[in-house]
Image: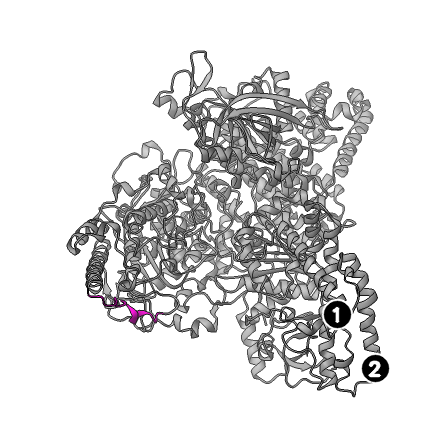
Amino acid sequence: MTKILGTGAYDFKRHHVAEYPVDLPSHLGDKPVEAKPGVALSSSITLSEIQRDNLTRIAEANWLKSGGSKPEKAFDPELVKEIYHTELKVKSGRKPVPLQRVMILEVSQYLENYLWPNFEPETASFEHVISMILMVNEKFRENVAAWICFYDRKDVFKGFLGRVLHLKEGKELTIAEKTNYLVFMINAFQSLEDEVVRETVLRLASLRSWQSLSYGRFQMELCMNPDLIKKWKKMIKKESDEAKRQGGCFDPSASFEVNFLRSLIEEFLEVLDNKVFPQKHSVNEDDELADANGFDQVEDASVLYCERFMEFLIDLLSQLPTRRYLRPLVADVAVVAKCHLSVLYRHEKGKLFAQLVDLLQFYENFEINDHVGTQLTDDEVLQSHYDRLQSFQLLAFKKIPKLRELALANVGAINKRADLSKKLAVLSPEELKDLVCSKLKLVSKEDPWSDRVDFLIEVMVSFFEKQQSQKEAINAMPLYPNEQIMWDESVVPSINYSGEGCLALPKLNLQFLTLHDYLLRNFNLFRLESTYEIREDIQEAIPHLLAYINNEGNTAFRGWSRMAVPIRQFKITEVKQPNIGEVKPASVTAEITYSISSYKAQIRSEWNALKEHDVLFLLSIRPSFEPLSAEEAAKASVPQRLGLQYVRGCEIIEIRDEEGTLMNDFTGRIKRDEWKPPKGELRTVTVALDTAQYHMDVTDIAQKGAEDVYGTFNILMRRKPKENNFKAILESIRDLMNEYCIVPDWLHQIFLGYGHPSAAQWTNMPDLLETVDFKDTFLDADHLKESFSDYQVFFRSTDGSENMDPKPPFRIKLPRMLKGNKHALPGNERSDKDSVNDANMVDAGIEKEELVVEAYIPPDPGPYPQDQPKQNSVRFTPTQIGAIISGIQPGLTMVVGPPGTGKTDTAVQILNVLYHNCPSQRTLIITHSNQALNDLFEKIMERDVPARYLLRLGQGEQELATDLDFSRQGRVNAMLVRRLELLGEVERLARSLQLPEDVGYTCETAGYFWLLHVYSRWEQFLAACVGNEDKATFVQDHFPFKEFFSNTPQPVFTGQSFEKDMWTAKGCFRHLKTMFQELEECRAFELLKSTADRANYLMTKQAKIVAMTCTHAALKRKDFLQLGFKYDNLLMEESAQILEIETFIPMLLQRQEDGYARLKRCILIGDHHQLPPVVKNMAFQKYSHMDQSLFTRFVRLGIPYIELNAQGRARPSIAKLYNWRYRDLGDLPYVKEEATFHRANAGFSYDYQLVDVPDYHGRGESAPSPWFYQNEGEAEYVVSVYIYMRLLGYPANKISILTTYNGQKLLIRDVINRRCVPFDFIGPPSKVTTVDKFQGQQNDFILLSLVRTRFVGHLRDVRRLVVAMSRARLGLYVFCRRFLFEQCYELQPTFQLLLQRPDHLALNLNENSSVTERHVDDFGNPYHVSGVEEMGSIVFQRINQLYQARAMYIQLNQYMAYSGQETPSIGTEEENGDHNSIPGSHAMDIDMPASANSATPGESQSVEGTDVNGLANGKNGESTPKGREGKENDSEVHAGDENVVPPPSNSNDRDGME
């Protein structure tokens, strides 16, 4: 039976990799690379420089494995010390590590091959431990698996973590070392899914840490949490007994773990107070606090340490296991108050620090009960605030006469910061200290800050003031970004975030405090990610306008931009009064007038296509009078360079043409037949402005005298519709924040990351389906036995007797605990041992448990061919059957589907079985892409689910390869057409019964007809049959509807047997019953008159399976709620490619019923070993882990999943390149038996090969603009091999060219456009795209270019490697720099296999067509191609031969025509090719190009030869797209190739940034 797996070290590691240029300090200047140890390499470091570098030489001598063997040198601890002190230790500067040196060491496997194998916890030096810390940190920075190499020695790993914790004892660390240490701790606390790490670090934030609290705070915490008193006493007793046993005295507060976090916090406060500004040693309250910027000399390294420490505390407070016991400690030391009063908080260099302090304060006061883990409601928060103030007023009234006024004031008068500070000012410093430290016990008397009045007031105010609730905060936040947030680098970093510093961003990790916390983090990240994209669009559009100041001093524009147009007039037309309880206006409406006269037709039509709900941006441009000098431009910010003053967003309400006629109206105000094309060139658009932003702007004008933003707008900018849906998604998240949203109880804890991982698995759920009808799941009885191999299967008939010849369909009564499910493994470990034991037990002859299966005969569906149900033909594997069983039962089902393992087939069968077993339930299907949704839908239509119950929402419906229309409109039309067909059948039935035909007038009359005439006749017939069973022809003679069924293909009754005829009669009646049931369903469409009402009824009531993309679900959530959309089951395909929040929203597209969520099943299907969701900004990807999908997080949490284990896509040999990444991925019998997979690839010796590409014209990779990598040698080589394949006769649509970078994609397209497209016999390939874009697709032959020659780059992300290796079915040829990739630790399993074959392309030149009978294991006579130039000359030679053959053929043609004979057909002997090839080159379409038709053979060779010769040694200089100009080529469509999908007009792959 199926294995259900959890996670172990093997499964999930962080792997989103990127690589960045590094800004190096100028003083490390231009020394030669070999000069001295400690010299940093420049950011444009080359492979040869790495090879010559001192560190590389040391690595080769000591630990680098070359050719599979390690150097013989023994471990030298002094070498570790020398490397640390000369190469890794930073003496000065902001950066805590010399990044290039660390990168070289990490790539050379310093940790895996030298530091770790030789680490002993007792003897290892300080340098050894800190070097390992740096290597682990670098792995986290690169987002590759960090802990995996430690798993060979788990006990030593614990010893290493212990050494790390004690590293500071008796040693003073430099500020850089402290920062590195802190980063390691941050990484450790972010890895709580790792068992060893979790055990070690959670002890630091346990209840024991309360020993370090001040006595007053300790008493207060225990009073507030009486449940902990018992736990505390038990813990103290246990420790005391342990100490006695060991013969020592018991001092609880002296323990290292008790003081670890407190000493870290105190060390941070020391740095903050004394090290950030070296010239300042103390600040008294008498100092002039306002002059924060007077401290000129700032220690950057200390600032970075302070920022990192804030990140550390935020991380700990934002996950429940560490928050519980740490929060009192943070409050006791008053970290937030001390940070607020620090000079850095107000200094210009402390902007990021201040944002982090505010984030820390937010999490310290988070609305949650720390010890129970439940979210506090708004009322509870408010009540707690009032109780706190009330008890303080009571204390003041009794004990402090000076505060009598405060004690008698109403709550509203003292809950604001200013009021409270003013009231407390009457106390003397001594009285204030006594109040805060002794009476309220908020801080300790011993705290050196307790003598500062400003500190004591800050502590009091932050404890008693009313905090803004999360709901209020999110409602007051504008949904559109403005210019201040857009260019704030600490919140929306530019693309080159290197992972070295921290940011003021929330993180998505394993756990969340509450649903509100989850939504808030996702809201902020989604908003900032869309802000980044908007910022990029603004920076792209504005420069084209060429703004300048004209003679009148106003802004004017010389240029034009496709996406931005100057505004003629802007006026605010209406500001509505605020709603009750709010301060912002209810709505703000404005009118904008602009002209589209300067645009050509196509761009004009784009502007005319604007419609309701589209988002536009209003920009205020005011360039400087004089153009900025080069020096000024370098120093200026982006808005200053663009002259950009303000940015505001708005949403279209309506758009009108010059005559005031409404355009693009979808509300029905303009009927379709009245529609006219828009007139004139002026357009007036009415927009809704953001009310929160408007309120903030108006307040600034009133209070601060700021400029009126709304009087300055002069540019209107639009964005591409597909990229402009952020507002609807943000609104959906905000609506969820404002609702009391309910995730089903069975999913709630798991969703937040708590509770038992298998709690939501079907075996632990109530209301199971006890007996399941599997319909067509099993093809035969043997198939069923194979699927339940752990059971002794007994087949029974419906009457309970044993069935000796069982045939499907089968019903199975499922036991609650199915055997073979390994979901109960402790620690989610892989249990090979158990499966071996199970096998032994079976062999020993121990009886298997019985499984009783009922084989039943399904009733006759009817006499017509269309009545017969469609049957499944897929022979599901036992694992797939396990996934189907889990999917149809209530609860959470997770299916990991490696490439080619039939994820879609499994999903479709789950839907099919679910529909038949729970016909009243409705299922929602969500996918990431339209392509996947269409694949799923096309397969559902081949199953026995009536088309009337299927509905496809969204834009991609028109791409469905079917004649049926599954959109809302299409389904409504289909229902109306079907109604007429059925009513026609009812009339025919009435005629056959000699009744009036008007019964078929409407569905209502047909319903009465059914009851009065049809059903009654059937009942009379059944009554008549009783007692006449012995008459063979009775049914034939008395069946009342015989005439109606006279038009069946075969006669209905035989008259030979009563039983057979009765069986057929019931089938006929079933046909009638289905017909009238369908009519009853059509009745609503008869009653509802408007198209919209019919469509909504269809969606909310009629459809049983509704499919849409995750984006559509997020966009339309409000509409679904208004219509009362309901569903019971959610199936999500590609769920490892969907953002967390876009997975969450589809779970909540319906209102809860009586406080309960209706959702019963959640089925997630995906593959976390392939690429994650696309996040364009690297900072959000690397720092905030925004590209983590819910599926991946569930896998990390150890939630059981089923991994499909048999692939049917690729040759078994190619599958080995990636199946090491999965647990036990094997091959389906099909790929082992099918002849196609046994035949070699004609013209090639091997079915897969790595081809080493040396420098071409003296260079390897190049980057015309940052992260736009290209490699001309690889591009030329790949295209040459493609041409070679085409000349052999491989079909173009069977070949795809993939690469890992956008720059290379554009370069290869350019080479193809010049070398292939002009020739009819070559043409372009099926696709030229990036690996990322090709995920989810496949082709027979893949040519892959890896581009990089300096650093491995983002292919170090093993998930990208898995996608790249798993796209090919029959042939994979990888072009790359061998030395670079064979050294990469993460990629070794794949590259070791690739490198078992020669690294020069091996061709079989004696094969001249695409068909060969050579076996795949027979390598033939390999000819090894030396390089790009030789491949070019081979291709050139073949083209010459082809032209000679063509010329001869033309002469022969002319001769035959002249002599009147029939032209012989060329290439007939090749016509027996298999399905994956076409005849050889001489059998191609050999019409000459126009230029060659009239030329002699010699001329044609020379003409074409010139062009093709360039392929062998041409320099392709102009083909290299430079920077952005190159990106325009992206939109090019290859002429004459119907297989090519036009790529999007901008390169927005996830790797576009690289």
Q: Nearer the viewer, residue 704 or 503?
A: 704
User: Residue 1026: which disc?
Assistant: 2
Say whether residue 78 is left or right of residue 744. Answer: left
- Whether residue 256 is situated above or below residue 1466 in the rendered picture: above
Q: Which residue is drawn at 69% across and 63% down?
A: 764
Q: Would you place residue 996 above or below residue 669 in this image? A: below
Quadrant of the image containing the C terminus: top left
Q: What stretch is highlighted in magenta?
A: 1459-1473
* Residue in the picture at 57% in, 24% down: 592
| Res 1455 quadrant in image | bottom left
The picture places residue 546, in percent across and down from the top left corner, at 41, 24
| Disc 1 to disc 2, C-alpha distance | 25 Å
* Residue matched to label 1: 992
Most frequent secondary structure within the magenta stretch: loop
911 relative to 562 in the view: left or right: right
Q: Is residue 1522 magenta?
A: no
Q: What residue type is labelled 2?
A: Val
613 to the left or right of 59: right
Classify mark 2: helix, strand or loop. loop
